[in-house]
Image (tube, rainbow, N blue to C red):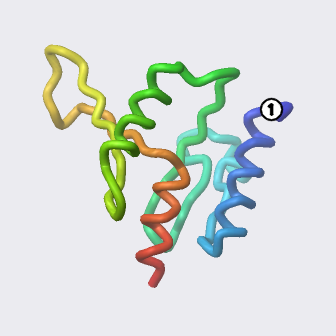
Amino acid sequence: MKTWKQYEARVTVWWNELGIFAKRVSKELRGEGCEDVQLRDFRVALEIKTRKAIAAYLRKWLAQADRNAGPGWIGVVQIHADNTHTDEDIIMMSVKTFAHIVKRYIP
């Protein structure tokens, strides 16, 4: 992928191909003070970030959560930094899992 803007466009197409209406907002507003992609039916604002690689330990944590969740359960990682409040934690799941959740609740 050449640029992060191209990836935003690709992500928008991917969601729409799943049957989940997505609109690329940052194209119109150049990413200034707005989300990159909206999943409007769900009031979800996606902020798209790209990196050359994702830390291996994050992928390991996610694999562990998926493995331990078992059939019919959703694996999610809650990441907590010492000396911070729990409501500042980060929830992580695969986009495949997130799409599955969203598709279950299409109006």
Q: Residue furthest bottom?
A: 107
Residue 29 % position (x, y): 67, 48
Q: Nearer the viewer, residue 19 or 66?
A: 66
Residue 105 % position (x, y): 41, 76
Image quarter (top left, top right, bottom left or bottom right) of the C terminus:
bottom left
- The residue depicted at 65 percent of the width and 24 percent of the height is 51
Image quarter (top left, top right, bottom left or bottom right) of the N terminus:
top right
Label 1 Cα neighbours within 10 Å, binned few <14 / some 14-19 / many ≥20 = few
Q: In this view, does 5 lie above or below 16?
A: above
Q: What residue type is labelled 1?
A: Thr
Label 1 sits on a secondary structure element that is loop
Residue 6 % position (x, y): 80, 42
Q: Name the residue under label 1.
A: 3
In the image: residue 72, left or right of residue 20: left
- The residue depicted at 35 percent of the width and 55 percent of the height is 74
Q: Which of 40 and 89 is in front in this view?
A: 89
Q: Nearer the viewer, residue 65 or 41?
A: 65
Q: In this view, does 21 lie above or below 45?
A: below
On the image, which quarter does residue 79 sit in? top left
In the image: residue 38, left or right of residue 51: left
Q: In this view, does 82 lie above or below 87?
A: above
- The residue depicted at 63 percent of the width and 65 percent of the height is 22
- The residue depicted at 50 percent of the width and 46 percent of the height is 94
Residue 62 % position (x, y): 42, 36
Q: How many marks?
A: 1
Q: Is residue 27 above or below residue 3?
A: below
In the image: residue 41, left or right of residue 32: left
